[in-house]
Amino acid sequence: MWSLRAWRRQRTLARHPVDPLRWQAVRQRLPMLDGLSDDEDRWLCEASVLFLADKHLTALPGVELDGEQRLFLAAQAQLPLLHLGELNWYQGFHEVILYPDDFLSPQRHRDSSGVEHEWDGEHSGEAWHQGPVILAWPGVLASGGWEGYNLVIHELAHKLDMLNGDANGLPPLHDGMHVGDWAKAMQHAFDDLNRQLDHDPDAETVIDPYAAENPAEFFAVTSEYFFSAPDLLHQVYPAVYQQLALFYRQDPLVRLRNLQHQHPDYRDAQP
């Protein structure tokens, strides 16, 4: 059966072919993609082209974008969607704004006594509800490895979270997933992290203590770790890892362990 959506997809891909050498250069800059199957790699390349056709990248002065840099960003953005099907998961925004460095953003918070506090916070990324995603370019360039940091995935996890409204750490779950299971795993880990930091604000927690800010940040940070340090996330919060595996329909830990078993560079890097 003829499909307008499929026709548009193929038309876009035909108009924006990717040089295999350019894609290979992008892949070499993104170790977190190592171990993908040929079919997954092909899907990710095509999805990256479609992402760039759908979202406008606004580079502020000081950020130089070429074709490889654009694909480098897009591939990270699309990795979480690898097995999520055809639903428009990144609906509700059309622009990614790239700053040359961290930026100041007005913040507002009402405390428990009702007093409202306002200040300018320094951020490397923001995702606005029904608005753009903002990224500091150095943070984008620092992403893509297995180090437990990925600014692109962090901010786009907020966009997935916002599909249910305001970001609250609960994205739309798939059929067969249960809110109770999700809430139990996330709340237990969130409370545990906060207990550690209440006991020692300077504690060297396994995952970034920024995850303790609120449930939305916990989901975004653990999504980063799920793709870029799955071994650490599974080590400290296996139930959270399991819920994220069900949501993203991926298992990066298996991919990482296979790489560690099969490739000398990864084998030598094992703890």
Image (cartoon, rainbow, N blue to C red):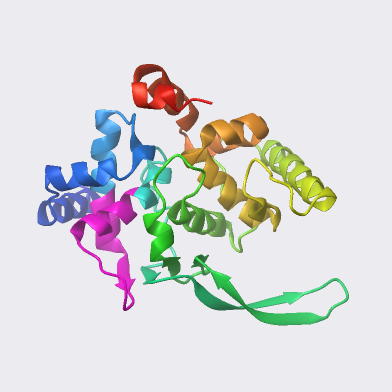
Q: Quadrant of residue 37?
A: top left
Image height of 56 relative to 265, above or below: below
Task: Give coordinates of residue 73: x percent, y percent.
Answer: 33, 55
Q: Is residue 209 above or below residue 58?
A: above
From this viewpoint, which residue is outermost toward the front? 268
As for residue 74 lying within the magenta part, the answer is yes
The quarter in which the N terminus is drawn is top left
Q: Quadrant of the C terminus?
A: top right
Q: What percent of the width, then of the height, locates residue 63?
A: 31, 71
Q: Residue at x 24, y 30 (%)?
A: 38
Question: What span is in magenta?
Answer: 48-75
User: Which residue sits at x=79%, y=45%?
Assistant: 196
Residue at the outermost right position = 113
Q: Residue at x 32, y 31 (%)?
A: 36
The spot of residue 49 in percent (x, y) is: 23, 53
Q: Residue 40's image quarter?
A: top left
Please tell me which residue lies in front, 213 or 147.
147
Residue 194 in the image, given as x and y percentages of width and height: 77, 49
Q: Is residue 75 left or right of residue 221?
A: left
Q: Nearer the viewer, residue 159 or 149?
A: 149
Q: Does the rendering let one see residue 126?
A: yes
101 versus 217 height, above or below? below
Magenta span includes 212: no
**Residue 59, quarter of the rendered image:** bottom left
The reply, left or right, for residue 8 in relation to residue 261 is left
- Report the label total: 0
Left or right: 184 as drawn, with respect to 139: right
Residue 251 visible, this angle: no
Which of 176 and 143 lies nearest the eye of the viewer? 143
Q: Nearer the viewer, residue 270 or 171?
A: 270
Viewed as shown, does residue 171 lie left or right of 266? Answer: right
